[in-house]
Image: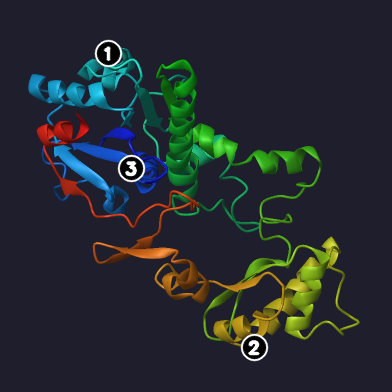
Amino acid sequence: MTALDGIRVVELAGLAPGPFGCMILADLGADVVLVERPGEAGPLAPPTGPLQRGRRTVTLDLKSPDGLAGLLSLVEQADVLVEGYRPGVAERLGFGPERCAEVNPRLVYGRMTGWGQEGPLAPAAGHDIDYLAIAGALEPLGRAGERPHAPINLLADFAGGGMLLAVGVLAALLERERSGRGQVVDAAMVDGSALLTTFLHGMIGLGRWRGGRGENLLDGGAPFYDTYATADGGYVAVGALEPQFYAALLKGLGLDDDPDLPGQFDHRKWPELRRTFTERFASRGRDEWAEVFAGLDACVSPVLSPTEAPAHPHNRARSTFVEVGGQLQPAPAPRFGRTPASVPEPSRTATVAEVLSGWS
């Protein structure tokens, strides 16, 4: 038994955010059926890769009467439908929220878009970097005096997109237990990106975010909350904000008895403090520093690459990465005491008839 055992999800193939949200649902035990269009698996297919784990995949031409009928037959028995088309496309193809509600009034209809279902930008194209830009989440990212820097596509696509979609779907399923009715979940990446800046807006409101990009406490401006290069070309991450952690940082660096060291929160002397830290960290290799700080509560960690992370002792102890179809992937999260998630399986093909026979 898993947390979402018995929940049936129909996912219409799309780009990264939707598949990630549905991957979360599948990881937690939902029976997710991915509907691909003919030719979807070709060389120009969306780069979903591991995001499709834990699915059965059927192929339907949704522009044909038979394909539409097949989809609606799945919808009739499903709990959730997820689509990532631009506003109005699903309606024109004949499987918009109203039509699906006629077939199944209890259906939770998840819509994953960049700009949402209404507003001036709703019909426009966009990508992660664009949603971050409009949400006010991109401008603060980067070094002082440099242009804003996008952190891969982690924030809008996945944290503010797919994760937001999964949360919305789960909330709608919970509400359905009270009302007996489904509803539309409008998950927009611009909304999710803005939501991720809630803490930042609190800092601004309290006057604790006064400098420009890369000049504040949590954006790399503070020398005790930053990354540093090591002698072997690696990096360490330093997050010694609180006084006790900062004291441990100085001890590990051998600076705890330096009477000339500037004070931690002497903003004017942060450049001097940064130069001292830079020189000291450059004197040893990354893993050497990891050993130094292993016994100190200083919030100092080695910066690992994605291929290195699975081998870290903590990740190995928690099985944070698991093997799926011969490939290491992040394990399902969060973890449950009574209904733990199982190790995901690679996606596999099926027919609509096979799916419906198992759902009947």
Q: How far apart are marks 2 and 1 (CA)?
A: 66 Å
Q: 301 or 44, which is in the foreground?
A: 301
Q: Is residue 275 visible?
A: yes
Q: In which quarter of the image is residue 142?
A: bottom right
Q: What element carries label 2?
A: loop
Amino acid type, label 2? Ser
Q: Distance between the residues labelled 1 and 3?
A: 23 Å
Query: Residue 107: x and y, percent?
Result: 34, 22
Tell me what residue is drawn at x 42 percent, y 67 percent.
306
Query: Residue 9: x and y, percent?
Result: 30, 34
Q: How far apart are marks 3 and 2 (CA)?
A: 44 Å
Query: Residue 153 vs residue 90: left or right?
Result: right
Q: Quadrant of residue 222?
A: bottom right
Badge 1 is on which residue?
99
Q: Earlier in the sequence, mark 2 or mark 1?
A: 1
Q: Quadrant of residue 70?
A: top left
Amino acid type, label 1? Arg
Query: Residue 13 vs residue 237: left or right?
Result: left
Q: Which of marks 3 and 2 is nearer the N terminus?
A: 3
Badge 3 is on which residue?
19
Q: Which residue lies furthest to the right in this view?
A: 259
Mark 1 neighbour class, 10 Å CA radius: few under 14, some 14 to 19, many 20 or more? some
Q: Earlier in the sequence, mark 1 or mark 3?
A: 3
Q: 142 or 237, which is in the foreground?
A: 237
Amino acid type, label 3? Pro
Query: Residue 309: x and y, percent?
Result: 45, 70
Badge 2 is on which residue?
283
Q: Nearer the viewer, mark 2 or mark 1?
A: 1
Compared to 83, does 94 lie above or below?
above
Q: In which quarter of the image is the C terminus?
A: top left
